[in-house]
Amino acid sequence: MDKNKNKKYEEDKSGIDSNTVGVYRTAATVKGGRRFSFSAMIVCGDRKGRVGLGYGKANQVPNAIEKAQKKAKREMREFPLTGTTIPHEVTGRFGACTVRLVPASPGTGVIAGAAVRAVLDLLGVQDCLSKAYGSTNNKNLTKAVIDGLQQLRSRETIERLRKVTIDKTHTETSHEKTPVAVDVSTNEENISEEVTA
């Protein structure tokens, strides 16, 4: 079974999407030969700031995926977002894996590998830079991303805890800017005047 071809998005009626990070096969050698079992890692999210990670094991692939999906939905937690990015830079760690997440300006996109992107996409992050150090195991990467997300704090939360006023960051101000509307009719009139002259 090809591990890289299992990244499929699924959507249920509650508006929660899920992405299969990987399906893994293990073999136990017993008296009669080999006994296979399967495990799956699933990420669930609503693309509105909530995401969860689930891991399930079973004797059949569909059962393992179903178990992982149920666990991921139970583990879903809310994380603060600033527009389409994260509020500030964080570093998540799990085992030998370290993932650094950096907020980005609108239009940057998610610059990340498959495992990190799976979590950020389902969280609702559209602009973010990331860098992975150490282990590149997909299981460890996704857990490291979740660890990093748990460190996120909104500006309002930090102000309340520290009892200080914090200025808005460049990222916050860039995400608050709205696109300027251009009057097309005026431009067309100006162009036609230039052509006739």
Image: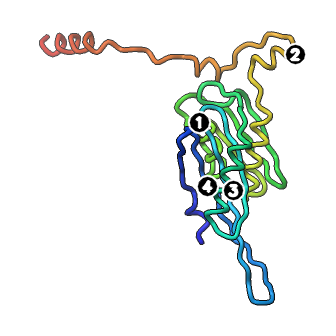
At numbered mark 4, what does the secondary structure look like: helix, strand or loop?
strand
How far apart, in angstroms, are the residues tagged by discs 2 and 4?
Answer: 40 Å
Q: Name the residue under label 1.
A: 47
Q: Please tell me which of labels 2 and 3 falls first in the chain.
A: 3
In terms of image quadrants, where is residue 108?
Answer: top right
Indicate the secondary structure of the residue bearing disc 3. helix
| Pair 1/3: label in front | 3
The amino acid pointed to by label 2 is Arg
Q: What residue type is labelled 1?
A: Arg
| Residue found at the very far bottom of the displayed protein | 32
Tell me whether the residue at label 4 lies in contact with that at label 1, contact meaning CB atoms closer than 8 angstroms: no
Q: In which quarter of the image is residue 188?
A: top left
- Considering only order in the chain, which callout, 4 or 3, is on the residue closer to the N terminus? 4
Categorize mark 1 by other alpha carbons within 10 Å: few (<14), some (14-19), many (20+): some
The image quadrant of residue 27 is bottom right
- The residue carrying mark 2 is 162
> Which callout, 2 or 1, points at the residue further toward the start of the chain?
1
Query: Of circles 2 and 1, which is in front?
Result: 1
Q: In this view, does 26 lie above or below 135?
A: below
Which residue is pictured at 82% across the width and 50% down the height?
94
User: Callout 3, which amino acid?
Assistant: Lys
Mark 1 or mark 4, which is nearer the start of the sequence? 4
Give the label on residue 157, or none.
none
> What residue does disc 4 label?
20
Residue indicated by mark 3: 67
